[in-house]
């Protein structure tokens, strides 16, 4: 099975923390959608397996018109084999999800909404420069549920300077209260060339507090686990068996095709990515000469990527898989490098799997880097 990702590079506002590829000018949206249709047609043979997930990400995919979405779906179903129960996700901002819009989306193949809430507090949303209000965030979730969308996930951000522990607790309780079955909770990071990075560099605000972020990460675990959420990946929590199919396939190394500017594709042996420029992307597609780069993955590349992604999940690193796919030398390297983390109880071995403990989860990226070939 495989996945399809479609990048919609438009937003109403530039969030202060975001470094994804997007534009706040919607002028090129019609040409961009036309280019997406062409690229879908050109790359229809990239994946050999049926699609079990389709994901519209961004940017803000909910800025697309119903007709634009319908055009994209018609192209996808014409050129790809989509399984009957495929997970089809649309990222959306709360201010876009009006009852009318939701009723329209419900007539399309979309069966999952990923709502960019980020916080239920007005002051937090203003600090992030989000386009929606706290009341819109709460209302759109109820409206989506009333419209028949039972498969909902929302995003929240912790570790921001104005987010107190009590406010973070209230955000998490609101998730439980609203009956949401999936949550992606991200620790705020300072990405280069963002407004957040600039204000910290120019001393307009202090650097982020790592101790505060770690405390709120542990608070996250303490709040959600008793409420029946499983932390199946460092930043992702779901009620039983409500895991995100699309993202889980990324972490478990299934192939996927990325369509649109800056989108990445992966077919087990190579990784490719489109140019992160809307004008050049459109021009390349229209000329039938797409602008993209390809990296051939060495065994070391594949091993390192497996370690990095598998360690973040509740399934952990499978020693038998390392042995069969990467060889005994890599397994010996792994077993040797992991000893120090076993001794410090940041990793535990269960049968033939290495899994992060509670103490190791907040330092997952650093631990993975220490295990790389």
Image: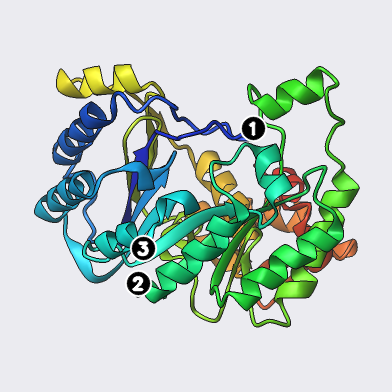
Element class at badge 1: loop
In the image, residue 154 lies at what x, y percent? 54, 60
Quarter of the picture containing the N terminus is bottom left
User: What distance separates the C-alpha of mark 1 from that of mark 3?
Assistant: 28 Å
The residue lying toward the viewer, choosing from 184 and 84, is 184
In the depicted view, which residue is nearer to us: 187 or 295?
Answer: 187
In primary-sequence order, the first of circles 1 and 3 is: 1
Compute the Cα span from label 2 to label 3. 7 Å
Residue 220 appears anywhere in the view: yes
**Cβ–Cβ under 8 Å for marks 1 and 2:** no
Q: Which residue is mark 3?
A: 99
Residue that mark 1 sits on: 16
What residue does disc 2 label?
147
Q: Secondary structure at mark 3?
A: helix
Q: Judge the density around disc 2: few (<14), some (14-19), many (≥20) Cα neighbours within 10 Å.
A: some
Q: Quadrant of the C terminus?
A: top right
223 or 106: nearer the eye?
A: 106
The answer to whether the residue labelled 2 contacts the one labelled 3, judged by CB atoms less than 8 Å apart, is yes
């Amino acid at each position: 099975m495989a996945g399809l990702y479609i990048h919609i590079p438009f937003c109403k506002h530039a969030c202060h923390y975001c470094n994804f590829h997007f534009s706040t000018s919607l002028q090129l949206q019609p040409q961009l959608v036309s280019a997406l249709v062409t690229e879908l047609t050109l790359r229809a043979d990239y994946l050999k397996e049926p699609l079990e997930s389709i994901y519209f990400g961004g940017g803000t995919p909910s800025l697309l018109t119903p007709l634009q979405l319908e055009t994209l779906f018609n192209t996808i179903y014409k050129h790809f084999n989509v399984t009957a129960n495929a997970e089809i996700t649309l990222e959306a901002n709360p201010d876009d999800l009006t009852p009318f819009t939701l009723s329209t989306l419900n007539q399309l193949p979309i069966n999952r909404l990923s709502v960019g809430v980020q916080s239920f507090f007005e002051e937090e949303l203003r600090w992030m420069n989000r386009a929606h209000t706290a009341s819109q965030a709460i209302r759109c979730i109820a409206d989506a549920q009333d419209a028949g969308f039972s498969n909902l996930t929302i995003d929240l951000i912790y570790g921001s300077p104005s987010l107190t522990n009590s406010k973070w607790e209230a955000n998490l309780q609101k998730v439980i209260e609203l009956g949401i079955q999936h949550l992606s909770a991200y620790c705020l990071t300072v990405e280069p060339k963002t407004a957040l990075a600039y204000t910290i560099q120019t001393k307009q605000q202090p650097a982020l507090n790592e101790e505060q972020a770690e405390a709120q990460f542990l608070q996250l675990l303490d709040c959600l686990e008793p409420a029946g959420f499983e932390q199946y990946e460092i930043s992702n929590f779901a009620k039983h068996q409500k895991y995100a199919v699309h993202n889980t396939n990324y972490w478990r190394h299934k192939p996927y095709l990325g369509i649109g500017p800056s989108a990445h594709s992966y077919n087990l042996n190579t990784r490719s990515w489109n140019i992160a420029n809307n004008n050049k992307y459109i021009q390349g597609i229209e000329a039938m000469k797409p602008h993209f780069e390809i990296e051939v993955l060495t065994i070391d590349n594949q091993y390192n990527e497996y370690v990095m992604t598998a360690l973040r999940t509740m399934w952990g690193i499978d020693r038998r898989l390392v042995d069969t796919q990467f060889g005994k030398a890599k397994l010996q390297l792994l077993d040797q490098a992991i000893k120090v983390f076993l001794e410090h109880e940041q990793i535990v071995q269960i049968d033939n799997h290495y899994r992060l403990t509670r103490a190791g989860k907040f330092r997952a990226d650093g631990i993975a880097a220490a295990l790389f070939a």
